[in-house]
Amino acid sequence: MSEKRRDSKGVLLRTGESQRKDQRYQYRYQDAAGVRRTIYADTLKELRDREEEIGQMAEDGLDYAAGNISVNELLQRYVGLKTGVRYNTKVGYKFALDLIKKEPFGKRKIRDIKVSDAKLWFKKLHKDGRGYSTITSVRGVIKPAFQMACEEDAVRKNPFCFKLTDVVPNDSKRRIALTEAQQRLWMDFIRADKTYSKYYEEFAVLLGTGMRVSEFCGLTKADLDFKQRRIRVDHQLVRENNGRYYVEKTKTAAGRRYIPMTDAVYRSLQNILVHRPKLKTERIIDGYSGFILIDQRMNPKVALHIEHACVWAMKRYRQLHPDQSLPSITPHVFRHTFCTNMANAGMDIKTLQYVMGHSDVGVTLNVYTHVRYDRAAEQMIRFASLLPDRAV
């Protein structure tokens, strides 16, 4: 009787399983068509999870390896393999899956989808009123799902590897930044309004730091260093639809940073703490406590609180000042405006990238589309004066 095979850790391997010289695991099996297939994984657990999926699909009469599953089933498989994703990413997955389930396209077999089919479907979505950003979100899920199927030989080619703007016009709204006059108009209104003046300090901090609103909501007393006048940003506070609070890391590793306090931000943060309700028991969320923003129910505020404050304050403003129009204002408009203000003030791009917490300098560079003409003219004249005289 031959000795049963074990891996390098002494774990007994099942039929079809083996461990390669590079320590990766592999599993060989026959698909529904009798073709020999092999799958690979870095760990035995991962390999066996995939074995179970293949077995389950076989029981359900599906042949993943031959592409005999629907687009919807492929997406469920792809999303099901994702672990440790952020809450917002989960929401994005659910949105895309729900949208595609309503489409006849989702019922088609993945082996039958060609590039032209994918392009025509995107054009249909746009014709049905889906915006460019929505289609981009859908593509962000379906393209990597097909790439997974392609790498596992379930399909020969990923039909979603094309430039989206070649098919669908980019009609997404350009991010706006408030002008200096608009900033004064808005903040003066908030300061003077009896109902919404309570949000003045919060708006002032967002406008003066460029923080993401979830980063702002995640700030605790321990994150404020008034002595060195700086704010530590290394996490953000999130609340799911079911009401569960949790703390997660910043959007990217570059999001971990210190933001200097200007005099205005320093005063606003001090005022927030002065008017912060005195709690009998500080709520602890994933080891964090002492959140500086507290709602009426004595719970930490989340992004939705401040977003709603912007919406209702804007409605009030438009009722009282129909002759002085302002663009719609959101917490992200404050962030974008801050970035534009710093760019206009001459902050160098790498410093601005750090303060904004952008992982890619290209994201920061996009804000320079808002640099004012007078700023450009001023810099051209100043730099031209430094150049040697020459014939024109």
Image: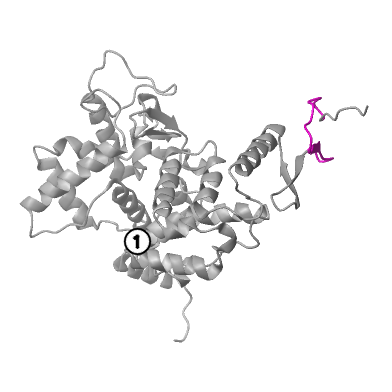
Q: Quadrant of residue 128?
A: bottom left
- Residue to which mark 1 is pinned: 130
Q: Residue at x 55, y 37 (%)?
A: 83
The residue segment tinted magenta is 8-23
SS assignment at label 1: loop
User: Quick one: 163 or 257, which is closer to the camera?
Assistant: 163
Residue 378 shows in this picture: yes
The stretch drawn in magenta includes residue 325: no
Q: What secondary structure predominates along the stretch shown in magenta?
A: loop
Q: Residue at x 42, y 73 (%)?
A: 384
- Residue 225, horizontal then vertical, whole percent: 38, 29
Residue 367 shows in this picture: no
Most extreme residue toward the top is 280
Residue 190 appears left or right of 6? left
- Residue 383, horizontal then vertical, whole percent: 42, 69
Does residue 15 sit above or below 325 in this rendering? above
Q: Residue at x 45, y 71 (%)?
A: 167
- Residue 166, horizontal then vertical, whole percent: 47, 72
Give, as a three-letter code, the residue at label 1.
Arg
Residue 91 appears left or right of 204? right
